[in-house]
């Protein structure tokens, strides 16, 4: 079974982040520019939160704020759920399902390695299943295919 580290290696470790004092509009522009569903909120090299499209839509509307006047720190999710790079794909999937999250920062020895989305995990699951099916077909046919 692939590990979270394997997924980060395939995907790449590009991390997009924004300051907690940036406007929600700036964050939304960054997400749109790079086709992201979330960005990490970082201050002085420390992850302070995560801001997702869902946070922007729900919290701006519910609090009666606009993207121009709301700060990232006012609408971000402060409790960031993360995973260690050595965990297996299955643990990553279960964590995302149990916590109802779509983006998961990945750490190795306390250092941020990257961020995975539910799409990244799904892609890896499909690839692992395809590989398993191919191996089983090869076994069943005795490799005569």
Image (cartoon, helix red, strand yellow):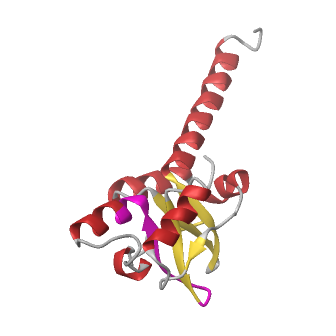
* Residue shown at 50% from the left, 69% from the top: 27
Decide if residue 63 is on the left or right side of residue 23: left
Above or below, comparing residue 41 to residue 123 in the picture: below
> In the picture shown, does residue 108 fall above or below 53?
below
Q: Residue 55: where, in percent of width, then height? A: 36, 65
Q: Does 87 sit left or right of 60 as displayed? A: right
The image shows residue 2, relative to residue 24, as above or below, that is above
Quadrant in which the C terminus appears: top right
Residue 39 visible to an observer of this rendering: yes
Q: Foreground residue, 45 or 105?
A: 45
Judge whether 1 appears above or below 13 on screen: above
Query: Does the stretch in magenta take in 138?
Result: no
Quarter assignment of residue 78 = bottom left
Q: Which residue is painted at 62% across and 57% down in the image?
A: 34
User: Which residue corresponds to the image point at 41% horizontal and 82% vertical from the top-left?
Assistant: 73
- In the image, the segment drawn in magenta is 44-56
């Amino acid at each position: 079974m692939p590990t979270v580290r394997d997924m980060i290696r395939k995907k790449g470790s590009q991390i997009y982040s924004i300051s907690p004092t940036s406007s929600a509009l700036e964050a939304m522009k960054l997400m749109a520019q790079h086709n992201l569903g979330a960005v990490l909120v970082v201050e002085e090299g420390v992850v302070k939160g995560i801001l997702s499209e869902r946070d922007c839509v729900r919290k701006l509307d519910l609090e009666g704020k606009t993207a121009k006047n709301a700060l990232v720190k006012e609408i971000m999710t402060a409790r960031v759920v993360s995973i260690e790079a050595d965990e297996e794909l299955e643990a990553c999937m279960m964590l995302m399902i149990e916590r109802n999250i779509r983006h998961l920062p990945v750490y190795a020895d306390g250092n941020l390695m990257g961020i995975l989305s539910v799409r990244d995990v799904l892609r890896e699951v499909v690839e692992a299943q395809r590989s398993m099916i191919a191996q089983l077909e090869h076994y069943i046919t005795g490799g005569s295919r």
